[in-house]
Image: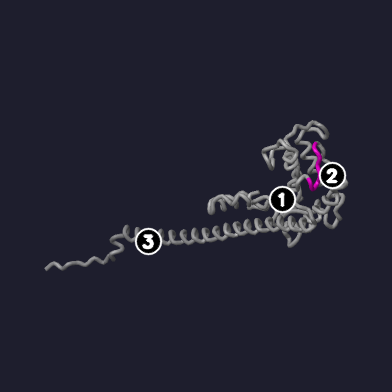
């Protein structure tokens, strides 16, 4: 009788292809799990980073609002009435406070005490509790009415509005004590905090300018406060995750 000879080769040696395929699939599963864990960790870190940026924006916005309200309140206590923009980014100094006559840019002697008080209050409020760490720039902005002007210092209403802002800024530099000097203040990047600009009649408070009272409303100085924001890369993260930040926070 013929005897049946058993094969001495194990199953895995008879089917090497299937064994190798199983090993590859197992390795791929492990790699997929590791990659998913790494991606999850990155997403968690990104979410935390974006949340911190949003929190920083919210804090900076609150700091700006507090600065504007504190300045307006302290000035009102000193019988100096200024106006606050709805988004709490602008302190508007009306013409009757600084007395700019039509076509003039210098601050008359009768208004100089008021001008100095405004600068001193601003210096004290802005530097309180390290508030400058949350700010980018404070603009001293000059404005005119819409009547054409071609006198000194030249350049029409553009030059006139700019020189009004320069006059106030230079007066602050002369009249305010050195320990409160605004030109020494720096933002979070170590750059000068204050800047000066002129807008001519391009940003009127009232569009109707027929009466002298209308002209005076637009003949003014605005103090515009802008807050620090994330850099371009961080800003895109914030925008892609939460949408466009609040308009007030962008000023």
- Residue placed under numbered mark 2 in the picture: 107
Q: What percent of the width, then of the height, locates residue 108? A: 86, 44
Q: Earlier in the sequence, mark 2 or mark 1?
A: 1
Residue 4 vertical placement versus 93 (above, below): below
Q: Which residue is mark 3?
A: 23
Q: Is residue 48 magenta?
A: no
Which residue occupies the foreground of this view, 179 or 116? Answer: 116
Task: Quadrant for residue 143, please give it.
Answer: top right
Q: Magenta stretch?
A: 96-102
Q: Could you say where residue 193 lies in the image, as x and y percent from the top left?
A: 75, 51
Q: Using residue 153 as the reference point, say whether residue 40 is left or right of it.
A: left
Instruction: Work out whether residue 240 or residue 161 is closer to the camera in this orientation and state it.
Output: 161
Nearest to the eye among marks 3 and 1: give it.
1
Closest to the camera, between mark 3 and mark 2, is 2
Q: Which mark is residue 11?
A: none
Q: Nearer the viewer, residue 213 or 236?
A: 213
Q: Secondary structure at mark 3?
A: helix
Q: How many marks?
A: 3
Label 3 and label 2: CA atoms lie apart by 86 Å
């Amino acid at each position: 009788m013929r005897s049946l000879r058993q094969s001495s080769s194990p199953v895995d040696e008879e089917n090497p292809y299937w064994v190798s395929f199983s090993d590859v699939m197992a390795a791929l599963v492990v790699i997929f799990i590791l990659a998913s864990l790494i991606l999850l960790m990155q997403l968690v870190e990104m979410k935390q980073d974006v949340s911190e940026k949003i929190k920083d924006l919210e804090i900076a916005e609150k700091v700006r609002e507090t600065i504007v309200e504190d300045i307006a309140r302290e000035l009102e206590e000193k019988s100096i009435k200024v106006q606050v923009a709805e988004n709490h980014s602008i302190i508007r100094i009306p013409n009757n406070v600084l007395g700019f006559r039509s076509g003039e840019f210098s601050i008359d002697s009768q208004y100089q005490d008021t001008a100095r008080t405004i600068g001193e209050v601003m210096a004290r409020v802005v530097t309180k509790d390290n508030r400058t760490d949350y700010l980018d720039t404070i603009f001293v902005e000059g404005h005119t009415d819409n009547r054409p002007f071609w006198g000194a210092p030249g350049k029409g209403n553009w030059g006139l509005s700019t020189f009004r802002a320069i006059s106030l800024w230079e007066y602050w530099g002369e009249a305010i004590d050195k320990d409160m000097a605004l030109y020494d203040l720096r933002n979070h990047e170590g750059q000068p905090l204050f800047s000066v600009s002129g807008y001519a009649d391009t940003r009127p408070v009232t569009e109707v300018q027929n009466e002298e009272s209308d002209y005076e409303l637009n003949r003014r100085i605005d103090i515009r406060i802008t807050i620090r924001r994330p850099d371009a890369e961080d800003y895109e993260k914030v925008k892609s995750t939460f949408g466009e930040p609040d308009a007030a926070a962008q000023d």
